[in-house]
Amino acid sequence: MFNSLSEKLESAFKNLKGEARINDLNIANTVKDIRRALIDADVNFKIAKEFTDKVKEKATGEKVLNAISPGQLMVKIVQDELTDLMGGTASEFNITGNPAVILIAGLQGSGKTTFTGKLANYLKTKKGKSPLVVAADIYRPAAIDQLTVLAEQIGVDIYAERENKNAVEIVQNAIKEAKSKNKNVVIIDTAGRLAIDEVMMTEVSNIKLAVNPTEILFVVDAMTGQDAVNTAKAFNDKLDFTGVVLTKLDGDTRGGAALSIKYTVDKPIKFMSSGEKMDTLDVFYPDRMAQRILGMGDIASLVEKAQDQFDEEQAKRLEKKIKKNQFDFQDFLEQLQQIKKMGNLKDLMGMIPGVGKAMKDVDIKDDAFKGVEAIIHSMTPEERSNPDLIDAKRKLRIAKGCGKDMNDVNAFMKQFEQMKKMMGMMNKMPMGGKFPGMRR
């Protein structure tokens, strides 16, 4: 995410590396490089200039001139300005009403339908809501099919009228359906086009007038940069939407949309999304995004993702087993599965300060644990719970069962034993392997 922008900003800060003080010359050089990095990221020139003018103004202040570490202070100034440019703080998402009505708008291909599914899943699992998704794209049967599949996947109801070509009538009927079935949120997936046209804009405006939504979210493909910002302005002029959603942040995102859209339409970015999995939707935090762009990681989001998958009872059971040196392959498999549920592995690594930069050229696939899982799945339940049973004969059978070489099985077994030893050593520490501040 934003790798190119991050690298160019880091290069810009090198102007100050080793400098004892900030002066007009090194400020000018750094600011020029920052502006160039923003423009290369497809940020509008006017926005890039205004941004760097603010950075320059702050950098030439009296406090900065007396700074001990000019480079670090410049990074802090840029971080604050990036945060402000993207909205400052996370925006509230309004789901009040009986039912709350959320209208999803955007161009075809921006990820509207996938986002509709993700939002329904988010509201169901994180907010305890009972959503109804509505297929209001009357032009593309494939959109109805896609939303139907997604609704079944996440276990929510869908409302569709395949033969009805009146989108306003469909959504009005859907709201009646929601009330009759005690659904407290209605999410409407509207039609899109490859480009803005009057028919699409009129239709979505008519839907807005008919149902008076509590939230109107404009979905933006983050990979389209400045074009997405221009499209957002046209939609906002017509719809006056309440917030923006950035999708496809796992692609080759230059950053222009994320950095420019709040400035252009004066509407907050409320969610960001990556990948096709239904649980890859996050609230947008401008300060956290600024940290990630500057290579500082995002520990807060990483902790939240871990807490979402945290099973307290399982953790207590696991802690007891570790204390008794009884950690086995089944426990290891369960931990792997929890990590996988947290999301894309490379994105997770990028949230750790300093690691994202080190891993930028490393290809970490989502199936990175597949080989290890195959080895464990080839074991009998008895072998999983009692690793000491596994002798050379059993290893050979396991290797054949998972299609691996004996060397792979031996290597994994050795790594597992080393991990068990490390756990045992941590358990003998004065605090029982716990970090300060952790609950006992």
Image: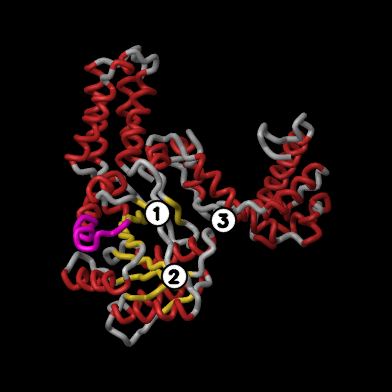
| Picture disc at residue 62 | none
Q: Is residue 106 above or below residue 365?
A: below
Front residue of 204 and 295? 204
Q: Which stretch is magenta? A: 232-242
Q: Is residue 322 left or right of residue 91?
A: right
Q: On the image, which quarter does residue 357 sit in?
A: top left
Front residue of 387 and 295? 295
Residue 412, image x and y in percent? 68, 47
The tag earlier along the polypeptide, 1 or 3, is: 1
The kind of secondary structure element at disc 2 is loop
* Residue corresponding to mark 2: 98
Q: Between tags 1 and 2, which lies in front?
A: 2
The kind of secondary structure element at disc 3 is helix
Q: Residue at x 71, y 41 (%)?
A: 419
Quarter of the C terminus within the rendering: top right
Q: Between tags 1 and 3, which lies in front?
A: 1
What's the distance in space between the residues labelled 1 and 2, CA to CA? 23 Å
Q: Amino acid at mark 1?
A: Phe
| Label 1 Cα neighbours within 10 Å, binned few <14 / some 14-19 / many ≥20 | many
Q: Amino acid at mark 2?
A: Asn
Front residue of 407 and 11? 11
| Label 3 Cα neighbours within 10 Å, binned few <14 / some 14-19 / many ≥20 | some
| Picture disc at residue 341 | 3
* Residue corresponding to mark 1: 271
Q: On the image, which quarter does residue 377 sit in?
A: bottom right
Q: Report the predominant secondary structure element of the magenta stretch.
A: helix
Q: Between tags 3 and 2, which lies in front?
A: 2
| Label 2 Cα neighbours within 10 Å, binned few <14 / some 14-19 / many ≥20 | some
